[in-house]
Amino acid sequence: MKSFIRTTFLLTLFVFTCRPLLASAPVKIQNVDTSNFPKINIEITAPGLVQGLTENDFIIHEDGYRVNYVKITPSEKDPEGGSVVFCLDSSKSIGIPFLKELKESALGISANLAVSDIAVYSFDDNVVLLNGFNRDKRVVNTSINGVSLRGSKTMLYDAIYEAMSLIKNGPKSGIVVVFTDGKDEGSSITIQDIDSFSRITKIPVFFVSESSRDIKPMERIAKLTGGSLAFTGGEAGILRAVSSSLKGGYIINYHSFLEPDGKEHNLEVRLSSGQSDSSVFCLDRNIFFVNFLNKENFFKYGLPFIFLLIAVAALMFIVRRKAAPQADPQLQVIKESKQPVVKAAPSAPSEDAEIVEYVPLTQGQGYAAAWFIKKDGDEAGQKIHIRGKEVTIGKSKECSIVIQDNRVSQRHAKVKNAGGVFYLFDLVSDNGTYLNGSKLLRPKPLYDWDEISLGKITLIFRGSKIID
């Protein structure tokens, strides 16, 4: 009876103790991409991860708060297995027995990997590429077996960076597997450099070491890059993780509500079946970015900014309205039922535009007949009648009134009769048309005894029989 109770107790304890481990082990966050913040991309993989999962199968938590809207897309990696780079520590500090264990682990992983291109580095005082990407396991195994102890330093971080660069410049995606005791001596590269480079290249770094070694730096790099740490003798676990990273997975996209504060934030990905994994990512500080989708930020920054824009727009409208040109007080529209009404425009009409119904304000009436009188010259006092709807003045023989003066253009000016009101136009002449001593900038009505100057000639406008 006691044996039964003891067995039941141990069984229950095992189930409740191991259940979280069994539930959380398969899912792995390989990379968290924040380069397009506030859009976040998460790359996940898992051994035997079920295909065809949808948004309803994933739950994302950011600093403990659930993300409501996510988009899931399958991640298709190289079907031929991708690239793997082995980095073996060959510094004298690790000792011959431990080097032998590391080489055995590397040979075991190489033998059991699916079809992959494998490159091998050794590192001590220098980082040496023993063989480039190669699928021939004999070449790879020869490189691994040829690693021997030498040098007094351990350029671990430099070796990781070179391995990542080799994958980045290659044709396929891949991963880095490092066999080391975790010590770094003499590297010019830092953990921060590896983290930054991994964010760009999305290359995870895995470690194989001993539990008695200083594993904190290796754990940190593995966590930052999306890799993992295993110990010698546990090649099966690292092999599953490596194989998973080379297989397809899922890309999770969502919109973050966090602030770019330069701090680390917690991220958890959980499947509806219970598997989960967590990671830490950092958002670069950006004082110019404000997440207006956050309700607090919207009322704190968004509304004042909107009110400011409205105020600026209103002020610009008032200023432009005050600065707008006013209508010429000498022109007014006569509103008659029998004839169309045309409003006076602030800019001058073109040469061929029709002017209808403009009258002098002081008179309120038009002229039945009109003529010019030459004021000076040999023909002073000569009377020239204005007949028809339009009279042109210029040096050309085709003009109604021909003036032989070099300062007068071929078509210099014209007078147009609009219902008894006579308007003077300048036809873009070279030397300009002057009305009562002022240069004519736009069409103006003519009054009795107005003087029109063209070159050396001055014409006096006369009108008779004012229309009642």
Image (tube, grey):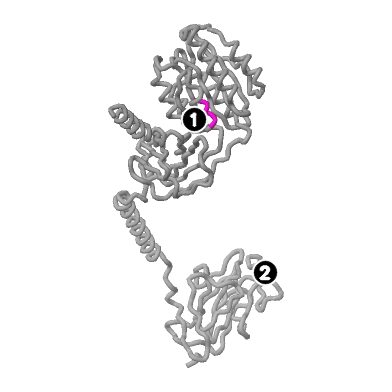
Quarter placement of the N terminus: top left
Mark in front: 1 vs 2 = 1
Q: Name the foreground residue: 365 vs 332.
A: 332
Q: Please name the amino acid that badge 1 sits on.
A: Ser
Q: Residue furthest left?
A: 2
| Residue 62: image location, x then y, percent | 36, 41
Residue 293 horizontal side relative to residue 180, left or right: left
Quarter of the image where one finds residue 352: bottom right
- From the viewer's perspective, is residue 31 above or below residue 460? above
- Label 1, on which residue? 198
Nearer to us in this view, 345 or 290: 290
Residue at coordinates 45% horizontally, 13% vertically from top-left? 185
* Mark found first going from the N terminus, 1 or 2: 1
Q: Which residues are magenta?
A: 238-243
Name the residue: 43% across, 33% down.
25
Residue found farthest to the front: 1
Q: Is residue 244 magenta?
A: no
Q: Characterize the magenta stretch by its predominant secondary structure.
A: helix
Q: Taking 270 as reference, is 431 above or below it?
A: below
Q: Type of residue at label 2?
A: Gln
